[in-house]
Image (cartoon, rainbow, N blue to C red):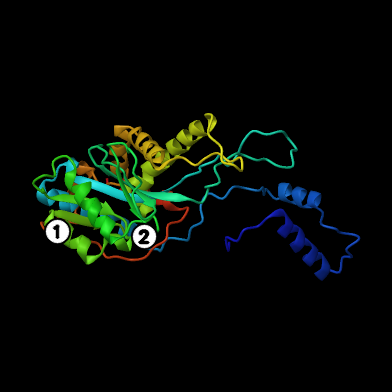
């Protein structure tokens, strides 16, 4: 119930501790590994891969979920906003090495090794953005360095650099100008909605001012709720990372140049940008449309039903939902039952 990690050795240690309290001599009960494995089988236990490391959502998470969805849908109804002006953006880390966690190897081998470039912890940041009508915006790639390398990058990506390799306020302002304000149909700054998480770099006064100037309403997801309210988190980031891993594996299988120590030379910044571009633009159009619908952000029919149900009347001027700090849990799937109740 305390959600602490338990392995076979811990079971053995606890069993010996209980035996000592009961006065059982050590020579009569050794709590061997074989005994521990049989104990686990008898009681229906096995070693499992952890699916997530999260904390429990608060009791009012469903109310906050519906409140956020109402806020976004009310904004759209109040201005008759087309799907092409509803967007979601999120930054995600991409590591230079993305090796398999499992590989086929000889049974009983003392070591299972896999070749890498030695850059498993070196990362770059990619700001992904898409629209509710299924269109993708150019990936915004941030390298961890002081200057942009003088290379030929793909024309469908934006490349920037930052000392820590992360999104900050100046880069966020640059992203708004170079990506968001240059999306299809944004020339005259029509009314639009941008769904973002509660990362503080998104909410600085400078960013909010620029958003107001471009007629963009910010819909900020409550902290810890991105796993159920952010289209990129819910449906798109994992396929993007899976595709990146496939491209990494294909690149590693080619004959690569080696360093003096025998390691494979790390890919160039241009090669990484090509990989990001290929992975992002390979995601199907329908997947993006479904992602927004699954988060109940673009489902206009649902908005009409919520209005007619009398639960919450749509007002001409929507108010932003109250912000709070919440952590997602493995029970996030139960939150999707809220969607069926309001539809």
Locate residue 64, reporting x and y percent. 31, 60
Image quarter of the N terminus:
bottom right
Label 1 vs 2, first from the N-terminus: 2
Is any part of residue 280 visible from this angle? yes
Q: Is residue 126 left or right of residue 193?
A: right
Image quarter of the C terminus:
top left
Of the numbered discs in the image, which one, if any, rests on residue 21? none
Front residue of 137/75: it is 137
Front residue of 36/156: it is 156
* Residue drawn at 56 percent across, 41 percent down: 259
- In the current view of this chain or complex, which residue is farthest to the front? 260
- Residue at the spot of label 2: 61
- Residue at the spot of label 1: 212
Q: Residues within 10 Å of mark 1 (few under 14, many from 20)?
A: few
Q: Between tags 1 and 2, which lies in front?
A: 1
Q: Is residue 17 above or below residue 298?
A: below
């Amino acid at each position: 119930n305390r959600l602490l990690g338990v392995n076979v050795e811990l079971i053995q240690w606890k069993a010996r501790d209980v035996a000592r309290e009961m006065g059982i001599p050590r020579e009569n009960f050794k709590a061997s590994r074989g005994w521990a494995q049989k104990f686990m089988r008898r009681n229906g236990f096995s070693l499992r891969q952890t699916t997530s490391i999260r904390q429990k959502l608060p009791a009012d998470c469903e109310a906050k979920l519906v409140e956020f969805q109402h806020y976004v849908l009310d904004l759209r109804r109040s201005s008759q906003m087309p799907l092409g002006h509803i967007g979601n953006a999120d930054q995600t880390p991409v590591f230079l090495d993305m090796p398999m966690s499992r590989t086929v190897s000889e049974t009983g081998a003392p070591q299972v090794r896999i070749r890498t470039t030695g850059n498993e912890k070196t990362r770059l940041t990619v700001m992904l953005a898409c629209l509710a009508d299924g269109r993708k915006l150019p990936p915004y790639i941030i390298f961890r360095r002081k200057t942009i390398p003088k290379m030929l990058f793909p024309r469908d990506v934006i490349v920037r650099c930052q000392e820590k390799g992360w999104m900050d306020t100046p880069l966020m302002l640059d992203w708004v100008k170079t990506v968001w304000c240059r999306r299809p149909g944004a020339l005259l700054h029509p009314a639009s909605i941008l769904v973002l998480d509660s990362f503080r770099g998104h909410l600085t006064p400078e960013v909010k001012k620029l958003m107001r100037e471009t007629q963009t309403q910010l819909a900020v997801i409550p902290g810890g709720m991105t796993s159920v309210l952010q289209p990129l988190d819910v449906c798109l980031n994992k396929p993007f990372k899976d595709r990146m891993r496939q491209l990494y594996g294909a690149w590693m299988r080619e004959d690569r140049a080696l360093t003096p120590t025998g390691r494979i030379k790390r890919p160039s910044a241009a090669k990484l940008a090509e990989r990001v571009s290929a992975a992002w633009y390979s995601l199907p159009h329908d997947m993006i449309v479904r992602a927004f619908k699954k988060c109940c952000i673009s489902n206009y029919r649902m908005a009409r039903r919520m209005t007619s149900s009398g639960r919450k009347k749509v007002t001409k001027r929507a108010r932003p939902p109250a912000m709070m700090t919440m952590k997602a849990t493995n029970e996030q799937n139960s939150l999707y039952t809220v969607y069926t109740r309001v539809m």
